[in-house]
Amino acid sequence: MSARVANPVGAPPPRNNYLNATHGLSSWLLTLDHKRIGILYLISVSAFFLVGGIFAGLVRLELLTPEGDLVSGDVYNRLFTLHGVIMIFFFLIPSIPAVLGNFLIPIMIGAKDLAFPKLNLGSWYVYNLAGLFGIYAMLKGGVDTGWTFYAPFSTTFSNSYVVPTAVAGFIAGFSSIMTALNFIVTIHRMRAPGLTWFRLPLFIWSNYATALIILLGTPVLAITLLLLILERVAHIGIFDPALGGDPVLFQHMFWFYSHPAVYIMVLPSMGVVSELIAAFARKRVFGYKFVAFASIAIAVLGFLVWGHHMFTSGQSVYAATVFSVLTMLVAIPSAVKVFNWTATLHRGSISYDTPMLYALGFIGLFTIGGLTGVMLGTLGIDVHVHDTYFVVAHFHYIMVGGAILGYLGGLHYWWPKMTGRLYNRFWSQVSAIVVFVGFNLTFFPQFVLGFLGMPRRYWSYPPEFQVLNVLSTAGATILGVGLLLPLFYLLASLGKRGRWAGDNPWGATGLEWETSSPPPTHNFDQAPIVTHGPYEYERLHPTSTADDREPYGG
Amino acid sequence: MAAEHHGTLAHHFESYDQQREASSLGMWLFLVTEVMFFGGFFLAYIIYRSRWPQDFALASHHLDVTLGGINTVVLIASSLTMALAVRSAQLARRKATVLFLLFTLLFGLGFLGIKAAEYADKFEHHLVPGPGFEFHDEGSDPRHAEMFFNLYFGMTGLHAAHMVIGAGLVFWLMFPAWKGRFNAEYHNPVEVVGLYWHFVDIIWIFLFPLLYLIGFHLEG
Amino acid sequence: MSVHVEPVRVYVFVFLALMVGTGLTVFAAAFDLSASGIPFANDLLAMAIAVAKASLVVWFFMHVRHSTPLTKLVVVGALLWLVFMVALTLGDYDTRGLLGVPGK
């Protein structure tokens, strides 16, 4: 380990860091520095999040009243489709890997960069190219098939801009694959001396497992979208019932990717949560190896359960039964993680900084989402609630309550490292609580609505469902406020009155905290040599508690 | 290691070995995605072929086994020349590398030329899927024949698109090869393009019997 | 670690073996082997030959013979995932209609 003197909180960063090393737009647009590329992704991903959020707001606005009175049914179909497509492909899937993963992985393993820096920059441009196709489709009128693009509606009957949207998804897949490939090679081949697999931070294990899923699953989405495009454009009707084709085959191929995709979206957040719990309970993660292997187990088992999205599709009963049983299995490694995080918290020295608030929120909300997932995996229950708001509530508990809270927690944790600045503590905690309250108000009523029989993707509903819908829309408004607040205090931290973070404002372990904030372009002044595991709080700081950390203030 | 070689070692790698291993692993991981990509198409083939084996055999009978066979030989030959190109690059044999790359490229273009001729023939015989598709064989369902041709054009078309990209990569390699940039330490560009090329060959090794030969035993 | 250089004769032998395999697969396809009583006999033979040919390409032309254990794991992994996808999907198609209930 290098013997440099750490910069304390309040001290400005070294003169030459990755942010000011070079200047000008082209030094950013042509950068090969993984840290700058992470920032570029942060900007793109945030822009798409805003657009996806606006669509969600319009959906919830329509659902304030039972009648379809805000927009036509056709427009409503486009609103929820675009909300789904943008949130999944342009926000959730890239979010943690492309922003935090890109920034942190080389630093956490003691490397100077990822294995393929040009591929990394290329992945950002490919992502933006995909975005252009998506925006084009949106501006021309959007797509109305639902983000699942089921045939034969998508292949034959839809009059919307299916092809440009499918092209956008196809291209975005390439960006995803490029990032995943880079991560896998980097983690295998570029770890610092002494950094064995079981000394890696769990954030690395999670992103590694995520990269495996991306690599193995995304190509199947690609071929499915390609076949969809070929059917619309070139009469190559693989799914065309008129030729004897089977639309259920589309579903098999689509869900082979799209189920593992949900693990692409949540695994990185789990990795963040492991880091946050350790740092803010000042304790090593309980059962490190179990958590590490659980990530791999989720990645593997996640590929074997896709038929649980197709219980009512015409799939055979035997296949449905097999998929239901396998679905029970995939819940186990996720549960292992929740137990281990809880055990880590037990007798820890806990501080309630904003990242920890998000981590705690994750544990609770992910558990609810996960349990309702097990309910959905139970064949008999699913027949009743498939295609209802129960499903919508389930996956939003995972994707927002889980994945997004993990992303926000990670962003708040590593913001000082990435920018060298501390944000306003009070407003960040307020924001986390507002998000938590708003989220639950939005989505808990939807469990009830689904159980009572309100179908999803409908723009009108029976009047007896209105109260719950109004609660949900009220919640969405609060959630929106909570999600917009960071825009203000995070950007404010970058201004003249922002405080310097110093190397390690949280007093956390990890190679990223042993270099300056922001880090130098080559990450370390001296290449690190690792001699111990990732969360050695007891060994290195045997008597320290949360109170020993430097005061945050502000 | 000689000073003039340092331009080929990227700054974030510690050694040529690390760079070469990273580069190889990277291409192998990309090939994993290609296996799953083509795999989806093979899945569709398996499903429909097992539903309508007779109809598929009758449709397949319209493909030219001779041309398909020649293409198979040509592509395997191109894999040989590609492997020899990689070997020559390892041994820093500048002219041999360029020559073998050139042969690989020519074989590849030959393959594509024959493919184009086959496609043109199918077009003339109204076997291209779409409104103009016609299939009149006795005892066969023309809808299933059209599905066969969906798979034929889709899979060989996707394969051909990969060949075009491969040909482009092989052509692009000829420039640094001519300049003598490759040697025992640094030849990974040739190695990874070789891996890609061999993979595309392997896809054809499966496409040929599955598309061309399932109706070969039929009369006529 | 220096990279192993394969002798030319290895590549040429593999090429010749691939040629033999190609000829064999065409020859065998000319006969309807269903009379043998083995179901899908033609397909099994054609796939066996194709797998053998592909294995030669992977092992020799693609240098897996001299590759790291990680590379070998990657190759196995890709094939395994393909098997997952095909097997579980066929698990639906091959069991449809077994219950005798419409739509199941």
Image (spheres, coloured by chain):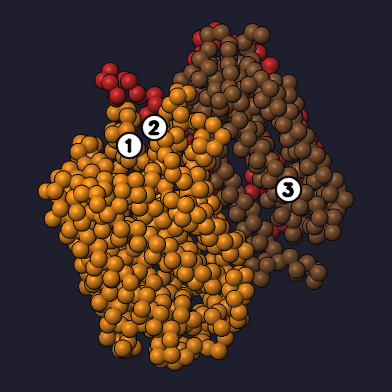
Chain colours: A orange, B brown, C red
Give the residue displayed 41% in from the left and 77% down from the top: A415
Residue C14, placed above or below residue A544: above
The extreme left residue here reads A464
Tag 2: Cα neighbours inside 10 Å, few (<14), some, or many (≥20)?
Answer: some
Residue A181, placed above or below residue B162: below
Which chain hosts label 2? Answer: A
The type of residue carrying mark 3 is: Gly
User: Relative to residue A273, is residue A417 drawn left or right?
Assistant: right
- Can you tell which mark lies on residue A248? 2
- Can you tell which mark lies on residue B168? 3
Tag 1: Cα neighbours inside 10 Å, few (<14), some, or many (≥20)?
Answer: some
Q: Quadrant of residue A264?
A: bottom left
How far apart, in angstroms, are the residues tagged by discs 1 and 3? 42 Å
Helix, strand or loop under label 3: helix
Q: Quadrant of the C terminus of chain B?
A: top right
Q: How many numbered marks appear?
A: 3
Q: Which residue matches tag 1?
A: A310
The type of residue carrying mark 1 is: Met
Asked if labels 2 and 1 touch by Cβ distance under 8 angstroms, the answer is yes
The type of residue carrying mark 2 is: Val
Give the residue displayed 63% in from the left and 16% down from the top: B61
Residue A114, placed above or below residue A527: above
